[in-house]
Image (cartoon, coloured by chain):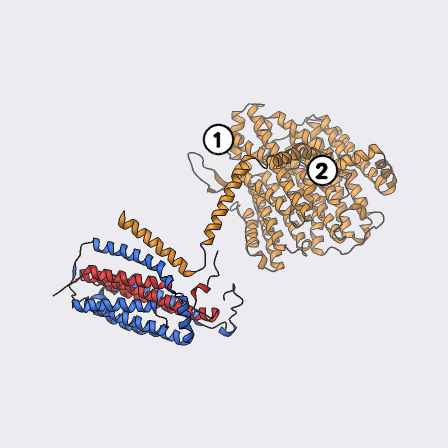
Amino acid sequence: MLMELWVVPALPLAGFCVLALVGKRLSRWLVAGIGAGSVGLAMVGAIYFSHDFMAFEPTGHLYRESLWTWLNVGGFSPDIGLYLDPLSVVMMLVVTIVGFLIHVYSIQYMAGDEAYSRFFAYMNLFVSSMLILVLADDLLILYLGWEGVGLCSYLLIGFWYQSAANARAAIKAFVVTRVGDTAMAIGLFLLFTQLGTLDIQEVLVRAVRQWPVGSATAIAAAGLLLAGAVGKSAQLPLQVWLPDAMAGPTPVSALIHAATMVTAGVYLIARMHDLFIIAPPVQTAVAVIGAATLVLAGCSAMTQFDIKRVLAYSTISQVGYMFLALGVHAWSAALFHFMTHAFFKSLLFMGAGAVIISMHHEQNMFKMGGLRKQLPFTFWTFLIGACSLASLPLVTSGFYSKGLILWSVWATGHPVLWGAALLGEFITSVYTFRMVFLTFFGEPKGEVSARPGPIILGPLVILAFFSTVAGCVHIPRPLGHFRLFARLVEQALPVPPMQPLPIATEVVFQLLMQGSVLLGVAFAYVLFLRRNDLVAAWTARPAGNALHRFWFSGWGFDWVYTTLLAKPYVWFAHASRDDAFEWIYRGIGAINRGLHEQLSRTQTGLVRWYAVGIVIGAVLLLGLVVFL
Amino acid sequence: MATIPIHYGLLLAALLFVVGLVGVLVRRNILFILMSIEIMLNAAGLAFVVGGARWGRADGQVMVIIILTVAAAEVAVGLALVLRFHGWFKSLDADRASEMRG
Amino acid sequence: MNAVFYISAGVAVLATVMVIVAKNAIHGLLSLLVSLLAVSLIFYVMGAPFIAALEIIIYGGAIMVLFIFVVMLLNLGPAMVDQERQWLPARIWIGPGILALVLVVEMGYVIVRRPNAGISGSVVTPQEVGLALFGLYLLGVELASMLLLVGLVGAYYLGQRRIPPEKGPVAQRGRLP
């Protein structure tokens, strides 16, 4: 029975309220219980509702729950409501399951932290906001969740705010995503003024009815929404915040900056798919942005030292795959990759976290090495995640999801984008196995100070399981043609316009993709395990060194933004520091201060002085009454 | 029967009130300040009685009874404070208690 | 009857002035008692015997006794008289005197501007007062009882000696108990 769906986002919100209000007075176990328990209950609820949803198959494959009418003014009466369709079911399940596992992981990972309750409060608020985002039936509510996750991202990146670098990273993430969010807000204004509603389904229906394909308004609206999605999902050109966002605790990176929040942009585009379909140039832009991002970020990932930054660039790159899929109308492929990516990337992040705490908070991969023997559990789970990321054939979920994306890209007739994606596959497997080889193979370079406990390893094992089997929900034609996932999602999203190509072609393309993946693994094996001197020799040359630095700095985007935007702005701010307006405001401040000081003198603390004041007041008032 | 002009009664009340007021403003000893406040309350009561007597009604007297309770409560708390004050400052100087000056 | 009023009024004003200029607390209290008795007499003349009795019992009795107890508890000696003399130079009276004069002139103006009337002094019996008190003003009585309760609790709280006076840290000012 589908009812009371609101419980799912409300539970983590309640956890947040309790932890925020009285968290400091609770014991650590209670904090952990409330923090992880509320998300756990939300997960149970989400599974229950999803089961119901699939079992009862509500009419039109959607379920709406209207909670209350927010306000009712002159025909504008936005309902606060929730909306469940296969798309939100998938999102909700992934968010709650991954969220719960990461909360459990955090119980031990954050155990030594002073601000234990603050951490769980923020995390709960995040899960709640994310669920509001994916369950919203109104763009306004969606925007509420959108900003909520942005806020939590900011708070959690700057979680260890005592360090200036962390605070700066948090501000950077907030400001950069704000660029996209502002564009998105303008897009919402545009939609509302043009279509007169913000109800998502209604917007889509009216947009398709009102705007012809390729009309300027549709392009503007879709483009503005795309800008929001690009900002949130760290795609070109707003990807610069994500690598720095790794300043936050590792569970945060796993939950927010890998599994859920960064895919909010994917969700937004999938949710507004009709709007994007009637704006073909924007749709193309989505695909091109995705393809460009996945290659660029992959190149940067190959040069990083910091294990978390590798994963950050890898996340950008993988979200790029999702955008690419969205751009070619392969909605279900994008969503499929979102799901598998959430599992294996959070697995990788949490494995990296386990390595980091075992190594005295060392994040530099070149100071690790040989951990395979010392941390076998972590190694095997990490390896499963890495294989899935690199999409090694057959046994990994990444193989199925990315294979579907690549095949969709080709079958919808985008050979250039397909080439970029294939290159991306190669790069992905290179940086993934570079990471694995540097961290777990070779000579041990640092000592292992602490072994991760069972609460850390448990979620790793569960996620490793998911990373392996999650691919089975959609098996391509050559291997058996099992389309459970696509069938579910296609109840909500249109079927991609694929050309009917023979199975043999698909086999060939699968083999091509696997070839590039295996080539990448071999490449990484040679370069980073056998012949370290080769890389050193390359980077020693001026050209190689320049390229290395260029990639290492993320293609110089930070430098461009600093030079073009930040510096002129700072200069302007400095230049206009002492202008006439400043004088006016300073004058007002000074006058108030002076008056305040005069007034504070009358506060002598002498009771009789105050009595005199009362008497004078009485005399004046009485005089006013008597003589006027 | 000779009558008392109401003006005189009210003027007397005003005079007593103002004398009490001067006491509050002038004395530094909080004991005397409390006494002066009693005088002022009493003067207010007198004004009520005069008013009630003018119309021959009981309301004025009811008000005096309420004023009496106020005075009693005030003096109970006030004198407890005086004891506390003396214990703290070793003095009855109201001006010593000026911790809250701005 | 009139003569009683005028004489009592004169005594009341005089005794009240003596209260506020008294140097010795006990002298001041005795003058206050005289003033209260005079006012009580005025109440009686005005036809309010019940209030006159209450005035003597509560004001002249209970409240004055409280004051006297406090003076005794404080054990103020002759040093206090000197202290008062020092605190009350002649010039300190000027400012409050002027203020009070202005106030009394204003009040007097308000009073005499209204038409005058005579007070016959016909007695309002305690029975009538009681009827009004527990009829029309019942809520007032309830509030007054509440106030007395608050006063009781407050006085009890303030009266307990949590910090012995001899240890009362006069030096540590700024940290009141």
Q: Position of residue C9 (x, y in %)?
A: 23, 66
Colour applied to chain C: blue
Which badge, 2 or 1, is on the more N-terminal residue?
1
Chain under numbered label 1: A
Compared to residue B16, the image places residue A585 above or below, namely above
Left or right, residue A362 beside residue A132:
right
Q: Position of residue A220 (x, y in %)?
A: 57, 27
Pointer 2 with pointer 1, Cβ within 8 A: no
Give the number of the mark in front: 2 or 1: 1
Camera-nearest residue between A461 and A431 = A431
- Return the mark for residue C38: none
Mark 1: which secondary structure? loop
Compared to residue A317, the image places residue B27 above or below, namely below
Chain rendered orange: A
Chain under numbered label 2: A
Left or right, residue A577 beside residue A468:
left
Colour applied to chain B: red
Q: Which residue is mark 1?
A: A196
Looking at the image, which residue is at 81% across and 39% down?
A: A521
| Residue A420 appears anywhere in the view | yes
Left or right, residue A553 beside residue A276:
right
Q: Which residue is mark 2?
A: A400
Crowding near the residue tagged with mark 1, few <14, some 14–19, many ≥20 C-alpha atoms within 10 Å: some
Q: Quarter of the image for the N terminus of chain B: give it.
A: bottom left
Mark 1 belongs to which amino acid? Answer: Gly
Left or right, residue B46 beside residue A514:
left
Looking at the image, which residue is at 67% across and 27% down?
A: A498
Q: Residue furthest front?
A: C90
Camera-nearest residue between A189 and A544 = A544
